[in-house]
Image (spheres, helix red, strand yellow):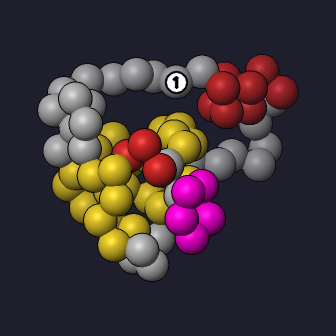
Amino acid sequence: MGFKLDCPNCGSRSYHEFWFGGELRAYEPDSSAEDDYRNTWLRANASGPQQERWFHFAGCRRWLTVERDTRDNALRGEDT
């Protein structure tokens, strides 16, 4: 199922122009190496709304933060 992301610099674009940067999670500077690995690389892949990072590689080369519902790809809110 395709969807579009609204880039604040380039306008509405297909998700094909972006690289998925993963779920946005809180950074814990005092976490153990194991916890840091888990937080960085292992995705929860939860069903429903989640905050995500997307990189506009085929456009302005900026990062976007969006809230996307993984069940239907509906975007709930976007900001940079």
What kind of residue is marked 1? Arg
Residue 59 included in the magenta stretch of the image: yes
The foreground one among 11 and 36 is 11
Which residue is painted at 25% across and 36% down in the image? 2
- Above or below, 25 against 13 in this view is above
Q: Where is residue 45 in the image (x, y as percent from the top left)?
A: 40, 22
In this rendering, position of residue 14 left or right of residue 64: left
- Residue stretch in magenta: 57-62
Q: Mark 1 points at which residue?
A: 43
Which residue is painted at 39% across and 68% down in the image? 7
- Above or below, 32 against 58 in this view is above
- Above or below, 41 against 10 in this view is above
The foreground one among 7 and 79 is 7
The foreground one among 22 and 15 is 15
Residue 37 can be seen, yes or no: yes
Q: Where is residue 23 in the image (x, y as percent from the top left)?
A: 48, 39
